[in-house]
Image (spheres, helix red, strand yellow):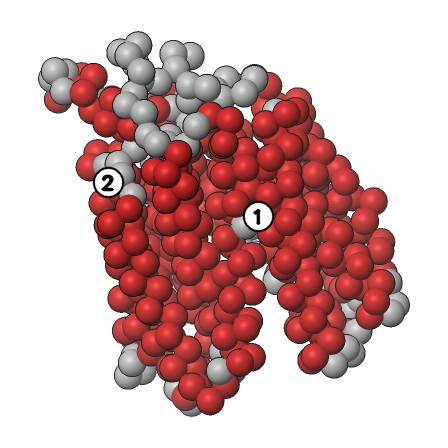
Amino acid sequence: MTPLPPTGAAPPLRSLSDARHIIAACFLGWTLDACDFFIVLFTLDNVAHSFATSLEAILLAPTLTLISRPVGAYLFGRAADRYGRRPILMATIVTYSTIELLSAFAPNLTIFLALRLLFGVALGGEWGVGTSLTMETVPPHWRGTASGLLQAGYPAGYLLASLMFLLLPALGWQGLFVLGASTGLSVIYVALYVKESPVWLASQQQMAGMPRAAKPSMLSVLRRYRGLVVYAVCLMAAFNFFSHGSQDLFPKIFLALQRHLPHPTITVIVVLYNLAAIAGGLCFGALSERIGRARAIALAAALALPLLPLWALSATPLWIAVGAVLIQFCIQGAWGVVPAYLNELSPSDVRATFPGVAYQCGNLIAASTGLIQHRIALGLGGDLAPALMIVVGGAGCAIALLATFAGPRFHSHLDGAPE
């Protein structure tokens, strides 16, 4: 495959200061985006009470957000491939912040759910655009570390949302949504300090003289790289089963209802394993510079497997916490390599679109993770521990196998990527 830029000329260099600003801006954007998403999960019962409806009805809100994420990944990604990464990144930030603010003042359940559907569109767009801007700008030897830092924004957002909910109960759910909408102010930082991707600028110069008909369409690119598309979506589906299977039912259903742990103890465990998740993403992202992306992913996934009994079968809070910390270090360690890996595999023509769509389509496939685990538990007498181990263990095995045996078939399209 021909590396970028296609003309053979080097793209304009960015200073290390520019690279740092882009990493900071995209990490901040993904952190705040995730925080806004998790605020809903922390306030489901409060929202249900305000709209005089059942908890089951409000559970549609996060489901609708997940369903619409692939739409946002495609729409915003295609816009970023055409108009540039920087302006579309700013557009996603403004969009999800505005929707978060409007959600606080929704007059009824129907409008609230419609707004959460639209929020998913912006949520799906931010990740792909932000990661492409970062990976095309930072020095090649920074990509692994930058990848781990960017993906660490997700558990950082989870942690921030939990702290907001714990420290600011007097605001109510509407107040938390308004506070969450203040994340839109981060667009000022992007406007002042972030520059456009040098790779995208170089590609535009190369394509400037091409007739419109000669420019590749999204469909033609996907047809050309259909094997890569199938691989990426399958890998990201396994990744989402891996993370959602270890997180979604673990705090409230498993720790609170099955293990009967008190709320303060659960809060401590959640904080600890989110800190471990951030550390894991940074460690394995940096390690991927030395051993390669696919090997780092496979190693992190494989290391999680022997930890499953400690994580799910421990009887005391201490050992449950140790298991949760270690397994999230490995799970999010594997995730920390994903931004760099998908961007380096992505065809240059659709780099703002391909990683985000692959990620969000995988997420859509895994959207029923909690339901699957619940049904497995019912079939095993109501014990959730084996269900957690089956889903997370199966996903971990799939990731390790795909990265080890299928990944080497595909080559990097991003200049400077490690072999």
Disc 2 to disc 1, C-alpha distance:
25 Å
Residue at image mark 2 = 79
At 81% from the left and 49% from the top, the residue drawn is 307
Q: Pick whichever, 402 or 177, lies toward us.
A: 177
Residue 218: % across, % down: 29, 29
Is the residue marked by circle 2 packed among few (<14), some (14-19), or many (20+) residues within 10 Å? some
Residue 240 is marked as 1
Quarter where residue 321 is shown: bottom right
Q: Is residue 349 visible?
A: no
Amino acid identity at mark 1: Asn
Q: Pick whichever, 275 or 301, lies toward us.
A: 275
At 49% from the left and 32% from the top, the residue drawn is 143
Residue 410: % across, % down: 52, 19
Up the image or down, 354 lies above or below 244; here it is: above
Residue occupying the far right of the picture: 315
Q: Quadrant of the C terminus?
A: top right
Residue 209: % across, % down: 12, 15
